[in-house]
Image (cartoon, grey):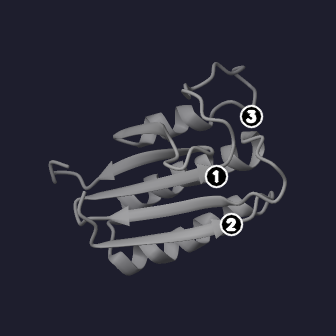
Amino acid sequence: MTPIGDAFWLLPRTPRTPGWARAFFRVQARSWGVAPQVAEAAELALSELVTNAVRHARAPRGREIGVKAVWDGACLRVEVADAGPWVDLEPQAHLQDGEDGRGLAVVGAVAARWGVEPRAHGIGKTVWADFPVPGSGA
C-alpha cells in the first residue's frame, strides 16, 4: 500500500474517544474523496476498534490510543494501536441479546480483511482493517 495520504491521531482513553475518532476520520476521508460506502464501513469498524481499546486494553492509566487512516486511492486502511497486552484476537461469542462482545464480529463483517500485530517497539498491539474500493482489485 503506497499511501496517497495518511493521518494519525493520538487520543486519550475516555468514553468520548470513539466519537472523537469518528469525527476526525469522517473529515479526513471526505478530504481524500473516499467513496461514501467505503468511508462509512471503515468508520463503523474504526468506532468498534477504538471502543475495544478504550474498554478492554487494560493499559496503564494515562496511555493514549493511536488512530491511523491510510488511503492509497484503491484501499482505505484504519488502524488502532493501544498499550494493552498483545494477544491473537478473535471475534467473541456473545449472547443473542447482549450488547457487548460484537465489536470484532462487526469489523469482520464490514472489512475485506483485518488483523492484529504486536507494535514494533514491543508495547501493545495494532489492530487494522482494510476497505478496498469495489472493483479496484485491492
The residue that appears at 48% across and 39% down in the rendered structure is 117
Label 2 sits on residue: 11
Task: Tell me which label, 1 or 2, sits earlier in the chain.
Answer: 2
Task: For marks 1 and 2, give the CA distance.
Answer: 10 Å
| Secondary structure state at the residue bearing disc 1 | helix
Up-down relation of residue 128 to residue 62 (above or below): above
Q: Do tag 3 and tag 2 residues touch (Cβ < 8 Å)?
A: no
Residue 60: image x %, image y %? 81, 49
Query: Camera-side residue: 54 or 32?
Result: 54
The residue that appears at 72% across and 42% down in the rendered structure is 57
Eye-nearest disc, 3 or 1: 1
Image quadrant assignment for residue 99: top right
| Secondary structure state at the residue bearing disc 3 | loop
Q: Amino acid at mark 1?
A: Val
Eye-nearest disc, 1 or 2: 2
Label 1 sits on residue: 50
Task: Tell me which label, 3 or 2, sits earlier in the chain.
Answer: 2
Residue 114: image x %, image y %? 42, 39
Which quarter of the figure is the N terminus placed in? bottom left
Q: Do tag 3 and tag 1 residues touch (Cβ < 8 Å)?
A: no
Query: Camera-side residue: 17 or 100?
Result: 17
Q: Do tag 1 and tag 2 residues touch (Cβ < 8 Å)?
A: yes
Image quadrant assignment for residue 77: bottom left
Image quadrant assignment for residue 20: bottom right
Taking the view exactly as shown, the residue that stands out farthest to the bottom is 31
Q: Is 7 positioned to the left or the right of 16 in the image?
A: left
Q: Amino acid at mark 3?
A: Glu
Label 3 sits on residue: 99
The residue that appears at 72% across and 62% down in the rendered structure is 17
Task: For marks 3 and 2, give the CA distance.
Answer: 24 Å
Q: Amino acid at mark 2?
A: Leu
